[in-house]
């Protein structure tokens, strides 16, 4: 493919996710097709107590969201100013009730920012993320999912790691994850009928390396977020949908920023995993297939971690759990 200097290739607005995925995995630069983020020298290098916006979303996942928001209440931020934006729909009553309950908690250096969307706009994760990116006044924007929790020292550690940086996209070097709750009764449903604070057992988390800025771990410079939004120019990711859409736009977002993300040291990044995905129609065959696949993946991870006979004499792992 040839590209004339100074000209951008025309991209069909009907390009689907698969075609975009192929483009994002190809050597073709996104700047041939879409606007580029501002160059590094035009991004502010801020220091001190930074403003950080956390952008999350929830559809029929109020139990996991309760873990996330409870972690912000339990571990007060001292060194940064944090805005917590949660996109949700009025039709999701348990989430609405939870947000009203959480919003009554006054937490130092935390500002709650609940945003409602019609379900068909909430069903496309990139729409809410794009709205937040364009409107944010923060120094940095952390795009995440509602199953991620911010344990002790997480956001203060992030504030320290961001001092004076101009990177377009960052991600934690490691994250800790629970095993995926697979059995009925491991976690009593995705919806939290009665709002309350929920706390994950620290011993349930196992540390994993992070190799790129995946969907819940995308920490974006505020100047970049305001300039290009979140897949703002990619029409396929800004169209409303009649049902929840698979979240694969984070790969295209990395392509648009021309980086897999730079790793930084952030403590206390902990994810509560779950096999049963409440946001999908539980009666659909695809939802059942997804659940079986996630169960198999979880069992395979457990087998890989299971110590063998050769491990008996090894010293215990002293890493974070």
Image (spheres, grey):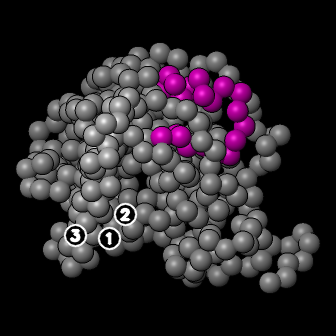
Q: Which residue is mark 3?
A: 292
Residues tagged 1 and 2 counted as in contact (Cβ below 8 A) = yes
Compare marks 3 and 1 and give the one earlier in the sequence: 1
Q: Residue at x 62, y 54 (%)?
A: 260
Q: Secondary structure at mark 1?
A: loop
**Depth check: 214 or 62 in front?**
214
**Residue 173 location, x and y as percent?**
53, 40
Q: Residue at x 50, y 54 (%)?
A: 214
Span highlighted in magenta in the image: 155-174
Which marked residue is nearer to the observer: mark 3 or mark 1?
A: 3
Quick check: 292 above or below 173? Answer: below
**Depth check: 8 or 183 in front?**
183
**Residue 215 location, x and y as percent?**
47, 54
**Residue 261 location, x and y as percent?**
62, 49
Q: Which residue is mark 2?
A: 123
Which marked residue is nearer to the observer: mark 2 or mark 3?
A: 3
- Callout 3 crowding tier (Cα within 10 Å): few <14, some 14–19, many ≥20: some
User: Left or right: 2 with respect to 259?
Assistant: right
Is residue 104 visible to the viewer in this orientation of the structure? yes
Residues tagged 2 and 3 counted as in contact (Cβ below 8 A) = no
Quadrant of res 195: top left
Quadrant of res 75: top left
Q: Which residue is mark 1?
A: 243
């Amino acid at each position: 493919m040839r590209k004339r200097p100074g000209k951008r290739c025309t991209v069909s607005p009907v390009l689907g996710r698969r075609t975009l995925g192929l483009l994002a995995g190809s050597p073709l630069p996104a700047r041939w097709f879409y606007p580029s983020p501002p160059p590094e020298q035009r991004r502010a290098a801020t220091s001190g107590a930074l403003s950080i916006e956390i952008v999350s979303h929830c559809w029929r996942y109020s139990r996991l969201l309760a873990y996330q928001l409870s972690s912000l209440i339990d571990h007060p931020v001292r060194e940064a100013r944090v805005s917590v934006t949660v996109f949700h729909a009025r039709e999701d009553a348990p989430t609405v009730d939870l947000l009203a309950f959480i919003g009554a908690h006054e937490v130092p250096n935390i500002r709650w920012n609940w945003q409602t969307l019609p379900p068909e706009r909430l069903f496309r994760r990139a729409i809410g993320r794009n709205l937040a990116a364009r409107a944010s006044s923060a120094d940095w924007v952390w795009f995440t999912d509602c199953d991620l929790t911010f344990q002790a020292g997480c956001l203060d550690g992030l504030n320290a790691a961001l001092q004076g940086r101009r990177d377009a996209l960052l991600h934690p070097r490691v994250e800790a994850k629970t095993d995926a709750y697979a059995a009925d009764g491991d976690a009593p449903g995705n919806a939290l009928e009665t709002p309350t604070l929920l706390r994950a057992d620290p011993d349930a988390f196992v540390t994993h390396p992070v190799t790129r800025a995946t969907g819940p771990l995308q920490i974006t410079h505020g100047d970049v977020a305001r300039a290009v939004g979140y897949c703002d120019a990619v029409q396929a990711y800004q169209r409303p949908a009649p049902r929840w859409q698979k979240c694969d736009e984070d790969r295209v977002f990395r392509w648009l920023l021309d980086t897999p993300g730079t790793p930084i040291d952030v403590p206390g990044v902990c994810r509560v995993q779950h096999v049963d995905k409440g946001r999908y129609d539980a009666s659909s065959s695809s939802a059942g297939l997804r659940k079986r696949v996630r169960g198999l993946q979880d069992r395979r991870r457990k087998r890989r971690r299971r110590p063998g006979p050769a491990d008996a004499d090894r010293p215990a792992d002293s890493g974070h759990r």
